[in-house]
Image (spheres, helix red, strand yellow):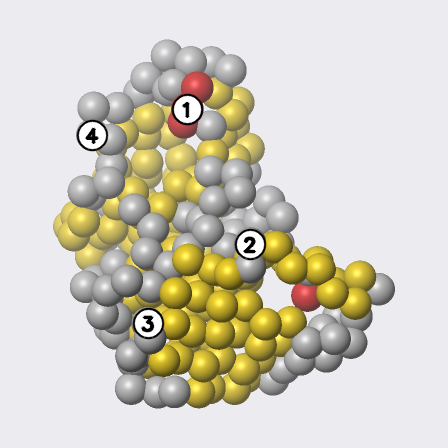
Amino acid sequence: EAEVAQSPRYKITEKSQAVAFWCDPISGHATLYWYRQILGQGPELLVQFQDESVVDDSQLPKDRFSAERLKGVDSTLKIQPAELGDSAMYLCASSHRGGGGYTFGSGTRLTVV
Amino acid sequence: SQQGEEDPQALSIQEGENATMNCSYKTSINNLQWYRQNSGRGLVHLILIRSNEREKHSGRLRVTLDTSKKSSSLLITASRAADTASYFCATDGDNDMRFGAGTRLTVKP
């Protein structure tokens, strides 16, 4: 069964350092999403791509977060500099262009110390 | 910002019992979806119900949707210990998906 691949699985970084996460969506899925999930809460949308274009990044803290999907396939989410409050699970998901159910990756657990 | 709100926040039942979780939302939707998340893992899509549907079944899952009350329910029948997880509703409105805070279900063997 096709999966959304994410790496790394876990990341520990010191505050003020830069950190990057990678996501490879299911082949053919035009829409890609990055979500942040704080422990005990539901996922919150950070950014949505349609092919290589950003559709929604209204909740992305743009002073420190950036995301790209240059060729409309895999994507990278970067945080620079990381802050203690960024500790969370970062989830990537993809879906077909027409919507429907999302397929999530296993996530990257970030701990900022 | 989150859209849906699940109720209850936590639910503990015995194996074999039914589990019902509710979701309320605020704005108009195209569809509503339910997801399951095991601890420390990603979310798994369970079922999607469109705004013009009232009820949908998938195996031991039954979902209802009342758009007039802006609410949905997820029923898991004959629960198993393996159903222990967090369950989230997600509303699909204008091009994005908003999740609630989830219901933590514990099924005791």
The residue sitting at 39% across, 41% down in the picture is A36
Q: Chain of mark 3?
A: B
Where is mark 3, residue-wise?
A: B70
- What number is the disc on residue A85? 1
* Residue assigned mark 4: A62
- Numbered mark located on residue B9 in the image: 2
Q: Position of residue A65 (x, y in %)?
A: 27, 29
Q: Nearer the viewer, residue B46 or B3?
A: B3
- For label 2, the SS is loop
Tag 1 near tag 3, CB within 8 Å = no
Answer yes or no: are tags 4 and 1 on the same subunit: yes
Three-letter amino acid code of the residue under disc 3: Lys
**Where does residue B53 sit, x and y in percent of width and height?**
35, 87
Question: Same chain for marks 3 and 2?
Answer: yes
Residue B96 visible: yes
The kind of residue on which mark 2 rests is Gln
Which label lies toward us, 4 or 2?
2
Both marks 4 and 3 on one chain:
no
Q: CA distance from mark 2 to mark 1?
A: 24 Å
- Using the numbered discs, state the Cα–Cα distance from disc 4 to disc 2 in whole angstroms: 32 Å
Where in the figure is residue A29, as x and y percent of width and height? 31, 64
User: Subunit of mark 4?
Assistant: A
Query: Cα distance, mark 3 to mark 2?
Result: 18 Å
Q: Which mark is residue A44?
A: none
